[in-house]
Every structure is written in C-alpha cells, then in structure tokens.
Image: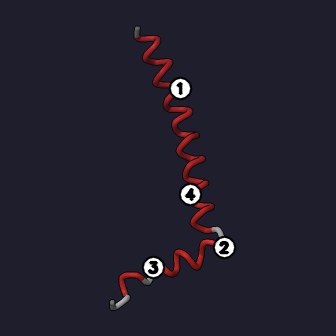
C-alpha cells in the first residue's frame, strides 16, 4: 500500500509541476500576445469610466 502511495505521489508531483508550468506559459503568452493588447487596455480603463 505504501509503495502505491509513493508512486502516485511522485507521479502527481512531477507531472503536476509540468502541467502547471505549461499552463502558466500558455496564460503568459496569451496575456502578452500583441493582438490582445487593445482588449486588455480597454478592460483596464473600466474602473475609470463615469457612466
């Protein structure tokens, strides 16, 4: 039983780290993609609008 837990924990730690690193890279690329700049600039101005 203990070997199974150790194997699953090792798998989750290794592949979980790789998964979250890949997810972070995708989100970062999306946020910094030049085509999305205008959309984010408009969203940043929402709190300053006086409706």
Q: Quadrant of the N terminus?
A: top left
Mark 1–mark 2 distance (CA, rounded to whole Å)? 36 Å
Q: Mark 1 against mark 4, which lies toward the viewer?
A: 4
Disc marking residue 51: none
Q: Mark 3 against mark 1, which lies toward the viewer?
A: 3
Q: Is residue 20 above or below residue 2?
A: below
Instruction: Tell me the residue that label 3 is attached to.
Output: 44
Q: Residue 25, percent across and down?
A: 60, 54
Q: Residue 8, percent across and down?
A: 48, 21
Of pointers 3 and 1, the one earlier in the residue sequence: 1
Mark 1–mark 4 distance (CA, rounded to whole Å)? 24 Å
Q: Quadrant of the C terminus?
A: bottom left
Instruction: Tell me the residue that label 2 is attached to.
Output: 34
Instruction: Tell me the residue that label 4 is attached to.
Output: 27
Q: Residue 21, percent across and down?
A: 57, 47
Q: Quadrant of residue 30?
A: bottom right
Q: Residue at x 40, y 81 (%)?
A: 46
Of pointers 2 and 3, the one earlier in the residue sequence: 2
Left or right: where 27 falls relative to 33 = left
Q: Mark 1 against mark 2, which lies toward the viewer?
A: 2
Q: Residue at x 59, y 76 (%)?
A: 37
Mark 3–mark 4 distance (CA, rounded to whole Å)? 18 Å
Of pointers 1 and 2, the one earlier in the residue sequence: 1
Instruction: Tell me the residue that label 1 is attached to.
Output: 11
Of pointers 2 and 4, the one earlier in the residue sequence: 4
Q: Is residue 47 above or below residue 6?
A: below
List the single residue furthest toward the left: 51
């Amino acid at each position: 039983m203990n070997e199974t837990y150790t194997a699953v924990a090792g798998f989750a730690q290794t592949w979980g780290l790789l998964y979250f690193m890949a997810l972070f890279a995708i989100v970062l690329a999306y946020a910094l993609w030049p085509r999305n700049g205008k959309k984010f600039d408009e969203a940043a101005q929402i709190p300053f609008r006086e409706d």
